[in-house]
Image (spheres, rainbow, N blue to C red):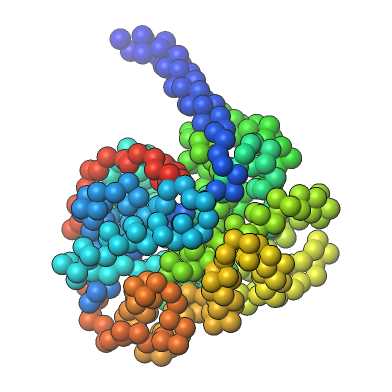
Amino acid sequence: MLLLEKILKPFRRRSAEDNVFAKINRQLLFMQSEPLSLGVECEFGIVNRETCLPAPLGLDIVRAAKHPGVQHELYQHMIEITTDVCKNAQEAEIHLNDRLSRITPQLGAHNAMLVGAGVLPLLKQSQVAPTETARYQQLRETRQELYRRFTTLGMHIHIGMKDTQSCIRYHNFYMRFLPHLLALSASSPFEEGRDTGFASMRPAVTESMPIGGMPYQFENWQEYKSLVRAMTRSGSISDLKDMWWDIRPCPRYGTLEIRICDQPATIAEAAAITAFVHCLGHWFAEHQGWLDDMPRPASWRMRENKWRAMRYGLDADIVADDFGDVRPLREDISQWIDRLEPFFEKLGYQQYRDTLLGILSHGNSAERQRRALATEGNFKAVYAHAAAELAAGHPLWDQPEAAAAEPEEPQVVELAEIKPYQYPHYLAQGYGLWLF
């Protein structure tokens, strides 16, 4: 029997590799979608209102909501909402608010609240419990200790593409705006009760993996496919979901998925950033030559600008050219908003433009969280302010202390005390892309 196993083992390994390669080839088939249609995914944390500890209620809430746009996440204190395919940012905002309305009524009985932030300020790895699916088990085995850091929360925006070449060109175009989108959405300045000094600490988690973080620029779809196949053959990936880039093609839905954003504190900000992305797409549709006329940014500059947006948020000075000249990121965003004004008008996005200008003037969520902490001197105020903003639906620019109260002494809850829950993986809905 042992001899037979030795003989069969290479064939079984080859068969498994062939199956993975065949799956990847199927996933690379590009399904055409309506050009510049939209889909949005938002992730939120569920915490106890008194202690601010993560509340493992996500699975119960998903079952009670009974809606494909309300889904579980890697850990039981996390929950995701997704839109259907939308024509514009207004429709996406309606869908997101609808999904939230199915969640919030269930929180009161558990004395829980929902928080939008890239990282929950007080969360410790020992306090969370995983959601068990075959996919998550495989991720945990591969990532080992790093897996426990993936308690971050983000927003993903899908843009419909008519064909593969359009997808690659828009991919290269939007890569230049990753720092802008990260700075506007930055909401993760704290980690385990400490100020990290960063506006957005969340991207540091995905950057810890070679298949995550800053993607590559491509000349054409064939170059992208060749990279995917080489990564598959090497064992780096076994599924397109393994590509945890800040922006990535999604052939299955015929979209380009922008994944750089922290989870904004409010639906108004999520919709405004989506509108900004949408206007950029419409502008590029009419200015395709811009990509060819502008020199391709050097890799070091792309990585440097992302890091500066992580570190300084809207106060970053980004590197404007490969010679090393810099300019304020806040100024660059403002100039692009001015450039996009005809599209804000055409699409009826004036309110979203005003929200973007409000973020530039009054601060992103990271700045508002720091103000709440400085005002009250405790993290309960940070949680309360974030929850109040999400409930209000828009930033509370002038109320950093909203609903603040003195926190109770945090409890120590170890992972062993919370049992993993076996839960089937959800089916695709709209642009809700396989979860990962």
Q: Nearer the viewer, residue 285 or 411?
A: 285
Give the quadrant of the C terminus: top left
In the rendered image, the vertical position of residue 270 relative to residue 35, given as above or below: below
Q: Nearer the viewer, residue 397 or 240?
A: 397
Q: Residue furthest left?
A: 109
Give x and y (percent) for residue 189. Answer: 48, 73
Q: Residue at x 25, y 43 (%)?
A: 423
> Is residue 412 at all visible to an observer of this figure?
no
In the rendered image, the vertical position of residue 347 relative to residue 247, given as above or below: below
Q: Residue at x 70, y 42 (%)?
A: 218
In the rendered image, the vertical position of residue 123 relative to residue 220, given as above or below: below
Give the quadrant of the N terminus: top left
Give x and y (percent) for residue 9. Answer: 41, 16
Q: Nearer the viewer, residue 237 or 114?
A: 114
Give x and y (percent) for residue 248. Answer: 57, 46
Q: Quadrant of residue 55?
A: bottom left
> Is residue 250 at all visible to an observer of this figure?
yes
Q: Judge left or right: residue 276 versus residue 84.
A: right
Count up the numbered dots: 0
Give x and y (percent) for residue 7. Answer: 42, 10
Q: Judge left or right: residue 128 versus residue 109.
A: right
Q: Residue at x 22, y 65 (%)?
A: 105
Q: Residue at x 53, y 66 (%)?
A: 272
